Amino acid sequence: MPVRVEADIKVWQRRDRNKQLAIWGGWFAGVLLFAYCWQIISVNTTWFFVWDSPRIAADIGSRMVPPRWEYIYKIWDPLWDTINIATLGTMLALFMAVPVAFLAARNTTPHAYLIRPVALFIIVSSRSINSLIWALLLVSIIGPGVFAGTIAIALRSVGFCSKLLYEAIEEIDHSQVEAIEATGASRWQIMAFGIVPQIMPALAGISVFRWDINIRESTVLGLVGAGGIGLQLSSSLNILAWPQVTLILIAILITVVVSEWVSAKVRHAII
Amino acid sequence: MAEVSVRAPGRRWSKPPFIKSPGLRWGLYIGATIYFVLASYSILVDVDWQRVYEGLPRGAKFLGGFFPPFPFANIIETGGFEELAAQRLIDIGDGLIESLTMTVTSTAIGILISVPIGLGAARNIAPAPVYLFCRGIIAVSRSFQEVIIAIFCVAMFGFGPFAGMVTLSFATIGFLSKLLAEDIESMDPGQAEAIRATGSRWPQWINYGVQPQVMPRLIGLSLYRLDINFRESSVVGIVGAGGIGSTLLTAFDRYEYSTAATILLIIIGIVFFAEYSAGKIRARLQ
């Protein structure tokens, strides 16, 4: 126990001296790094605009109320598109994610040094690239529209779903698999009866969780032309129709809160 | 001796279904099928297959941009290093530095603000009005995608990395405070009570009773958020909030697929490195 002796009285302290010094050193390095980064940002900032921002915020705020309620008839359709992008995108992602996860999990991969790294690379690249960038890419390849958005969401979700799924596969109870093996089952039968029942709850949980995230992500895909409510948002912003923007934001807020509620309920029912 | 049938009586075994109640199961199947058909129809009816077909060569060209990535491709093609290529590399470097500084500052600011809000949003620590207020902040921050917040920040603070930094800090608050609050709510009350029994004041109670229990997870989450912030910093640039995203958008707009591919490869590399080192740090902490 770290104890400091002060005038013959032992005083308890939380850490010994070297550890304390190391922690202070770490803090010092962290603060230096922060100051350096802040410096770079500060150089690239027009501070006049920042000091002026409260006035601008108040101005935008005053233009945003009251919301233009009549506009709601024009956003039902994009809202339906947004939900479709998220749902079908998630489904498509699951179709691709399941095989990738089986290839990436240490205990089910056909080859640990040839195939596993490829699967891991697919997972990392899909996860690193935001769905908006996927959408940007797909819009320039297959043209603007809901279809590009759906595929963008799917490509972004593959990595997320397979990562969580392969971790679930690696954590399965091996004795169940052995029991199936002992009956003389084939490789596919072992998968179907030994592994799949164990990861089914995880798979359901992951898909609902990702669906909830995808709802949120698909609300902005329209900004780059990939369909959904983001399209209305960007056109309203372009013509500075702030009351419409407010209404769209309210619609997004409600959709996201409802989807989060549904997702939480389903996950609660499964686990 | 008469023939004896060895067939055992009874039914053939089949796998138990995943959803037990038959009504719910069939209801879900039918509902999902109807929705699937409707939704696929509404998506596929709008697709311009001619356009998709025409775009495929462009997709191939983009994929070709990865092999080899652009600076090397330039050397192979021209035998030397062109001025234009050097300029592109400088652009990419500038965007990258902006992204990284945005990531670091926004994560630091986000953590600083989210700790008090996380404390306030934990039901077992905060009084009801504080709890509701903090939960409200978290709900707003979590509901809107970073890009939407970025649009407003750009409108308020002007173009540039400052708007991106504010956006990412705001998004960090929602993420970290929520998970921190959940962690505090599920902590072991015994330890906290033991500290309280020594007659500690409130800050001491938090410092010695609560903080040691949530610290490993808070560090893990902060590292994870650092990673997310970097990934998000690559998109807030699309609406003008600085970072590598604006460089990427320019590359796409000019159909410079090899530059775009290089940027994407760099992003993938950094995320991979960050994830790997975060895993190492987390393993040491636990």
Image (spheres, coloured by chain):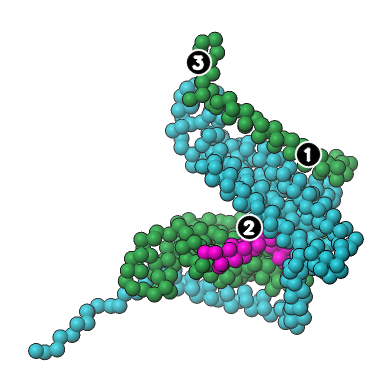
CA gap, disc 1 to disc 2? 37 Å
At a point 64% along the width and 67% down the height, the residue shown is: A155
- The quadrant holding residue B265 is bottom right
Pick the residue in front: A160 or B271.
Answer: B271
Magenta stretch in the rendered image: A112-138
Q: Position of residue B4 (x, y in %)?
A: 15, 86
Chain letter, colour green in render: A
For the residues labelled 3 and 1, the Cα–Cα distance comes to 41 Å
Quadrant, the N terminus of chain B: bottom left
Pick the front one: B133 or A7: A7
Q: Amino acid at mark 3?
A: Lys
* Side of A177 relative to A87 (left or right): left
Q: Which chain is depicted cyan? A: B
Q: Give the Cα separation between the discs numbered 2 and 3.
A: 57 Å
Q: Work out whether mark 2 precedes mark 3 in sequence or the reverse, and give the earlier one.
A: 3
Residue B254, position in %: x, y?
85, 67
Q: Residue extending furthest front?
A: B79
Crowd rating for badge 3 (residues with CA inside 10 Å; few <14, some 14–19, many 20+): few
Give the residue type at disc 2.
Answer: Val
Return the disc, 3 or 1, that comes first in the chain's sequence: 3
* Chain at tag 3: A
Mark 3 sits on what residue?
A10
SS for callout 3: strand
